[in-house]
Amino acid sequence: MPYIVICRLDQIAESAVLHSAREMVSLLAENQDFHRPGVIDEARHLKLGLNDIAEARPGLTAPGEIHVDRLIRFAQGWDQRAPLVVHCWLGISRSPAAAAITALTLEPDQDEMALAERLRTASPFITPNPRLIEIGDAMLGRGGRLIRAIRAIGRGADAFEGNRFCFAIRPGEEVPPATPDRPKGTG
C-alpha cells in the first residue's frame, strides 16, 4: 500500500523515520539549505527550488514546467515499496500540490474531484499551490479538471503551518495515521 507523507520542513526527519520512507521530494526556495534525513537515499531525493507563488515576481522562482516535469519523472521512478515524503516549508501549499500531481501520475484513471476531496479530508489546512496545479493539469492532460477540482475544495483553514498527513495515491486505499501534531492556528 504505497502512500505519500506530506509535511513541513521541520517534520521531515521524524516523518521519514516514523513511516520508514527512503525517498523524498523537497519543494523549497532556491538555495534554501536544510539537512536531508539519513534514512532518505540521496539518489532518491528530488529537490525542486521554487517559491510558493502563483505568478512570476522579481527575485523569486515561480513554479514552472521544468519543476513539474522533474516531479513527474521522479514519481514514475518511485518504487512504491515504502512511503514517499513530500514536503515544503509549511506543508500547506507546494507539497499538497505535488502530492496531487504524483497521485495522478501514478494513477491517471482516478477522478480529479474525488482526489481533491481526499486531500481536503486528509487536511483541512491545505491550499495547493495554484501554479503547480495548473502546470500539472496541462502536463498530465487533465483538461482543466484538476484545476476545477482544487478550486472547488477552496482555501484551507487558517494556520501558520500545516499538520503532517498521509495521502493514498489510489482511491479507496487506507493509510496509517500520520501521528500529526497540532498546527499553530491563527486564532
Image (cartoon, helix red, strand yellow):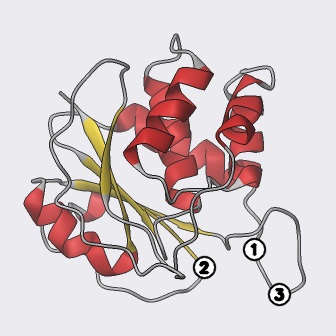
Residue at 62% from the left image edge and 52% from the top image edge: 128
The picture places residue 102, in percent across and down from the top left corner, at: 48, 37
Quadrant assignment, res 60: bottom right
How crowded pointer 2 is (Cα within 10 Å; few <14, some 14-19, many 20+) is rated as some
Query: Would residue 45 be visible to someone looking at this image?
Result: no
Q: What element carries label 1?
A: loop
How crowded pointer 3 is (Cα within 10 Å; few <14, some 14-19, many 20+) is rated as few
Residue sitting at the far top = 109
Drawn side of residue 99 relative to residue 2, left or right: right
Number of marks drawn? 3
From the image, tell me which residue sits under label 2. Answer: 29
Q: Nearer the viewer, residue 153 or 58?
A: 153
Earlier sequence position, callout 1 versus callout 2: 2
Q: Are marks 1 and 2 in contact (CB under 8 Å)?
A: yes
- Amino acid type indicated by mark 2: Ala
Above/below status of 34 relative to 119: below
Query: How far apart are the two marked residues, 1 and 3, measured between alpha carbons?
Result: 7 Å
Query: How far apart are the two marked residues, 3 and 2, measured between alpha carbons?
Result: 11 Å
Earlier sequence position, callout 3 versus callout 2: 2
Residue at 54% from the left image edge and 56% from the top image edge: 126
Query: How far apart are the two marked residues, 1 and 2, measured between alpha carbons?
Result: 7 Å
Q: Which of 6 and 177 is in front in this view?
A: 177
From the image, tell me which residue sits under label 1. Answer: 61
From the image, tell me which residue sits under label 3. Answer: 59
